[in-house]
Image: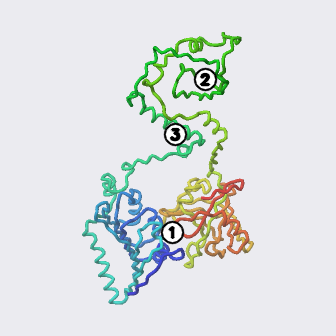
Amino acid sequence: MKLDFKIQCEELNLAKLIDDEMAKNPKKVYMFIGTLKESGFDLLEESIVDKKSKITLFMGIDKKNTTKGLLDNILKYTKDVYVYNNNDLKEFESNIYIFEFDKMASIYLSPSNMSESGLVNDISVFSRVVYKLNDENDNKEYKDNLKTLLELKKNEFTKLDEKLIQTLLDDKVIFSNKQYEHNIKSISEFIGKREIKRSKELTKKENNDIVEEDIVANEFNIPVVDLSNSNIEFDISDAVECEIEVIEEQTPINLVPAKKVKSVKKHKEIEPDEKQDEISEEDKELFNGVVDLNSMLLTKSKVKLNTVRTEVIEEEEKDQEKITFKKLDLNNISNYIFELPAKQQNGQDLDVVKIPNYIKAIIPNFFEFSQNIKSEVINGSQHKVRDIQVEIVDVKNDTKVFDVNAKMMQKKGQTYITIMSKFFENINYEEKDIVRIIKLSSDIYHIEIVSKDMQEYKIWSKIMNKKLKGVDRRYGIMWQFNEFFYK
């Protein structure tokens, strides 16, 4: 037996080591995972697809991380799945990966969950144990340890099948959309077409809240002053000309009969020679009649303690900058740019370029893979195939070839599509060299391979500011008219 400790970092991560082990086609694979998230299984799926290894999985399930889709997807690759309910106080905790070959077995023990961060990004210390199965002592020790692990079946683990998945969903043991109702607001609900609109809505809400809890005079036992028998005269002849600012549609406290004033007016003393017929009957009653202060002061009324000057808001609205949003049209994407993985040394996949399914989903019209496809059986497996033509340019060596028999393909169950051309085999590229795919027409693509030591590389590398899932490589897309959209 050999034991090694490893530290996960950008150059070395558990996802890459699992992929390397699966590339060797192990006979059996055992996984004992306490917390399995969809992001982690997405990475694992890229390694186990198309493999004939017998996989046995023990896993914990809960309401937070486990979905029906995740369990359905797992059953596509193996029926030997055993689940434990982690919603109770007693949980299943483990992260063990075992790869068994004819002459050896590799075991990885990790402190991290099976998630994208746990398999790729987190700085964690994990260990690798190697047993030589052609050694009698190692073989016995390995089988004894494996037997101990498989005895977990006796500890409240249940074998998973489609019927159990539905039962787990109905009993809310796993995530169900019926459990959680997420009210996700649109962008317009958060910031509105204008910030001023948002301000008005908040102001309206505040005022409404205040109206619901009106403060009236007699609630505080303030005495009502009876002035009905008092002789009080108002001499307005000495009033100086002043400017009274009247707030539109806002009259918090009315000391005169209510009358809506539409604009700011100047009130001054009334000269005898002014036209009296221009004064309304209501105004005459105001200046000539008796003012009943008893009914206007210190009596019950709906008084708003906080008012907002709407003319100030209107002034701010004029100066407010409009917030505009540019709608991204992903239907007109013309370029997909990404960094290449290292060229395979085992002679496989040398004639293809791989595009992950989630990239295809972002820009479906760029690949048009759902259109004009046919179904073919290749090497015993069902494939979706689309005939295309590609122009391949090796920028470093200044060579160009045109392949009229290229294909866009996807094998059933694969997490990626491929663009296949025999001319890819002749191009010597390195890891993180750039591929730039340009769509010329519905079925014609221009593909450039740009080496890291080329001047052009610096230009295209600035476009790619988004990382591909599970790997330390980047990508970017570009639409027509040389407008850039980073995704």
Mark 1 to mark 3 CA distance (whole Å) = 65 Å
Q: Would residue 238 appear left or right of 257 to someone viewing this image?
A: right
The residue to which callout 2 is attached is 261
Amino acid under disc 2 = Val
Mark 3 to mark 2 CA distance (whole Å) = 25 Å
The residue to which callout 3 is attached is 202
Of the image marks 3 and 2, the number of the one nearer the N terminus: 3
Image height of 157 relative to 217, above or below:
below
Front position in the image: 378 or 408: 408
Q: Nearer the viewer, mark 3 or mark 2?
A: 2
Q: Quadrant of residue 128?
A: bottom left
Image marks 1 and 3: residues in contact by CB distance under 8 Å = no
Image height of 371 relative to 314, above or below:
below
Q: Would residue 391 appear left or right of 98 to someone viewing this image?
A: right
Quarter of the image where the N terminus is located: bottom left
Tag 3, which secondary structure? helix
Identify the residue shown where x is 30% and y is 62%: 85
Front position in the image: 114 or 442: 114
Q: Nearer the viewer, mark 1 or mark 3?
A: 3
Front position in the image: 481 or 8: 8
